Amino acid sequence: VELDRTYAPFAYNAFCIQTGLYFGGHDYDTEIANDINRFGWQHHGDGYHNTTRYGEELPDDDPRKESLGVVYRNWHPGPLGFQIASDAFAYVYVSGLLLALDTIEEDMDSGANIFERWFDTSVGRRDLVGQRQLLQLPPLENMPEPRFCDPVYCSTPHPPKCLNYELPTFGPSGINVDSVTDDWSLWHEPNKWNYMVGKVDTAIFKNKNDPEWFEKCTHLDACGGIRTNGKGTIVYDLPVEQMTAGLVVICVCCGKKIAESMVLNNDNLVFKLNDRILEKSSMDLYPADKCVRLLKGFEEDGYEKEEKMLLSVEVLGGDTEVKISH
């Protein structure tokens, strides 16, 4: 609540599917008392609709019509639940747009120069008399303390930077590869067409026996990374300019608890920061068992922020395959 109140003046909004449905006036409490829980897993219909707009266009005998009316598949929303959330976003944003247009129209009627008031027409920012200024977010020191993570990591001016080898990956990489030996190679795991496709949809499209439909159903996500079976070195150029805490984490593949054997207990795997060996006795599993925190922070580990910081991953041999995903 404190976080919401801090951001509310800056147009921050939180969306909740169930709250939005309650606001519509449907008596869910009475239904729940009568053992009808529309927010339960696999329940069809939200009290206002029995299927999505897409589902309404399907013939009544199409088996997907009912499936599309699920509000919650499990703890994840179903098609109808996602439609509710997307409608809420559209409603709020369009309402905000209409308010902005009304305000601009009032300015035009009053004879104000809307180009000076609403648009920055200069090459460099200049303060114009009467110009509407965008509100700036509050400084970090005015924000409430983080509740679920270390303030050293969560009270920084920049978000974490990441190099992600999985597919699909969008946008520029947050961490660059400075150099890599030929011993390392990229890999990705292709998915079967029914990977992460619901049982109902799988049965429907399996009966079609149509390769074109199988291709359409194939999930785009694919695990991947860079690996080596023998010796090899890869060097990462860390984003020094935006590093304030000094946290460095590496994640490996595959398996939720693979990091302990592949990294911490692997004597043939060595990490160096600017040619200084990082001691594994100071490392731990963080934030999940497939990831290792190589460096907890600049001050705690005795490291100082330098103009350039190169993290090298060196495999000295052995039988353990090393596979880096993030």
Image: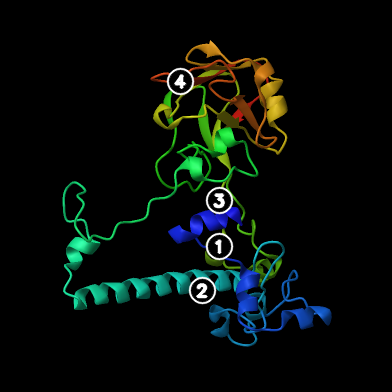
Q: Mark 1 against mark 3, which lies toward the viewer?
A: 1
Badge 3 crowding class, 10 Å Cα cut-off, few under 14, some 14 to 19, many 20 or more, is some
Does residue 124 sit above or below 229 in this rendering?
below
From the image, tell me which residue sits under label 3: 221
Q: Nearer the viewer, residue 50 or 325?
A: 50
**What kind of element bears circle 2?**
helix
As displayed, is residue 170 above or below residue 131? above
The x and y percentages for residue 50 are: 65, 83
SS of the residue under disc 4: loop
Q: Earlier in the sequence, mark 2 or mark 4?
A: 2
Give the mark count: 4
Question: Is disc 1 placed on a helix, strand or loop?
Answer: loop
Q: CA distance from mark 1 to mark 2?
A: 14 Å
What residue do we see at 52% from left, 54% from top? 6
Q: Amino acid at mark 3?
A: Asp
N-terminal of the two: label 3 or label 2? 2
Tag 4 residue: 305
Residue 92 higher or lower than 311, as above or below: below
Cα separation, mark 2 vs mark 4, equals 46 Å
Q: Do the residues bearing badges 1 and 3 touch, measured as CB atoms within 8 Å?
A: no
Q: CA distance from mark 3 to mark 2?
A: 26 Å
Residue lying furthest top in this view? Answer: 276
User: Would you name the residue on which mark 2 appears?
Assistant: 87
Numbered disc in front, either 2 or 4: 4
**Whole-number angstrom distance, CA of label 4 to CA of label 1:** 37 Å
